[in-house]
Amino acid sequence: MATVKKINEDVPDVVLMPKEDFEMPELKIILPKEEFRPFCPHDKIRIWEYHRIVECYGCGERLDPFDYLLNVGKKENNKLSELKWLGYQVKHKNEEIEKLKKEISKLNSLKRKAE
């Protein structure tokens, strides 16, 4: 292996890497490359009853049953609260429509009286 030359004696930490006869050390740990997987919402699942495993049907990833159940419960709660809010909106709009219908009938009666 070649010797390392110092660039400047005043700066002991800066060294010039040799260009010749330099051997890179071998890697001791080789990590497998992770394959790119697009985002999967885990909409469909497969349940292996005997092995007590929950897998995503789309991507094949094993899911923690508790986490999956918790996620489904949260989604259902969100849907129910949104449904409740939409029901309130429908009720409110129907009340406004009834008020407008009454207003129209009043205006029509005033129009007939004026003619």
Image (cartoon, rainbow, N blue to C red):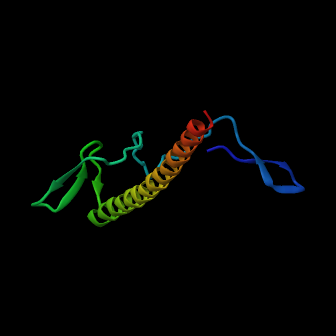
Name the side, left or right, on which 50 lies relative to 93: left
**What residue is rendered at 39% in x and 40% in y?**
37
Side of 31 relative to 57 (left or right): right
Q: Nearer the viewer, residue 75 or 81?
A: 81
Give the answer, above or below, for where 66 lies relative to 91.
below
Residue that protrudes farthest toward the right in the picture: 10
Q: Quadrant of the C terminus?
A: top right
Residue ID at (56%, 36%): 112
**Exactly how many numbered labels are in the figure?**
0
Q: Quadrant of residue 70?
A: bottom left
Picture quarter containing residue 113? top right
Say which residue appears at 19% left-offset and 59% top-offset. 53
Asked whether 27 or 75 is in front, the reply is 75
* Pick the front one: 59 or 94: 94
> Where does the image place residue 75, in percent across and percent down from the top left?
37, 58
Identify which residue, 19 or 42, lies in the foreground. 42
Q: Is residue 108 left or right of residue 11?
A: left
* Residue 45 rendering spot, x and y as whole percentages: 23, 50
**Residue at screen point 32% across, 48% down:** 42
Tell me which corner region of the image, top left, top right, bottom left or bottom right, holds residue 33.
top left
- Residue located farthest toward the left when viewing the structure as drawn: 50
Where does the image place residue 29, in percent across and percent down from the top left? 44, 52
Say whether residue 108 is left or right of residue 41.
right
